[in-house]
Amino acid sequence: AEELGFRAPPVRPEWAAKLAAREQAKAKPSPRDFKREASYEYQLADGTPHLLVEKLVAGDHKKFPQSHRSGTSWKSGLPRGFVHVFYKLPELVANPGAPVLIVEGEKDVLAAERLGFLATTTPGGAGKSH
């Protein structure tokens, strides 16, 4: 553009800082930048641990890796044919016929419980029924 005689106006310092912050937020963090913010354990109807969902956060970036129970430990990922269960399944089974809120995620289930509701979700959120 300069060869045609056009010159961009100077960037204001406050704009430059905002642009730099926006670009930094877009940058993909490395795996070690992520810190565990929460863990959610899914159980079978009898209370046996079945699935673990962790919330990992690095700035504005979030990940929700899942692990399945293998003996007495958690194994990363889900095996072929894995059966998903509702979050808080033992509580649902213990309250047959009770109204149940199906909410977006585990954090919302916990918030609904604090308000006195029976609530659940599925791994990945309410929109990901398996």
Image (tube, rainbow, N blue to C red):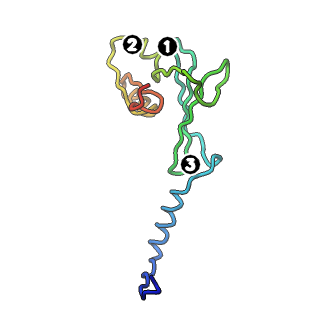
In the rendered view of the protein, which quadrant contains the N terminus?
A: bottom left
Asked if labels 2 and 1 touch by Cβ distance under 8 angstroms, the answer is no
Asked whether 114 or 123 is in front, the reply is 123
Q: Earlier in the sequence, mark 1 or mark 3?
A: 1
Question: Mark 1–mark 3 contact, CB under 8 Å?
Answer: no
Q: Residue at x 65, y 20 (%)?
A: 70
Which SS class for mark 3?
strand
Foreground: 100 or 84? 84
Asked if labels 3 and 2 touch by Cβ distance under 8 angstroms, the answer is no
Picture quadrant of residue 49 = top right
Give residue 58's mark. 3
Element under label 2?
A: loop
> Image check: 122 left or right of 82?
left
**In front: label 1 or label 2:** 1
Q: Amino acid at mark 1?
A: Ala
Label 1 vs 2, first from the N-terminus? 1
Q: Which residue is mark 1?
A: 45
Give the label on residue 95, or none. 2
- Residue 45, horizontal then vertical, whole percent: 49, 13
Q: CA distance from mark 1 to mark 2?
A: 12 Å
- The residue located at (54%, 21%) in the rendering is 81
In the depicted structure, whether residue 92 falls above or below residue 67 = above
Measure the alpha-carbon separation of dots 1 and 3: 34 Å
Give whichever of discs 2 and 3 has the lower sequence position. Answer: 3
Residue 95 drawn above or below residue 1: above
Q: Quadrant of the C terminus?
A: top left
Asked whether 23 or 130 is in front, the reply is 130
Compute the Cα span from label 2 to label 3. Answer: 38 Å
Q: Identity of the amino acid at label 3?
A: Ala
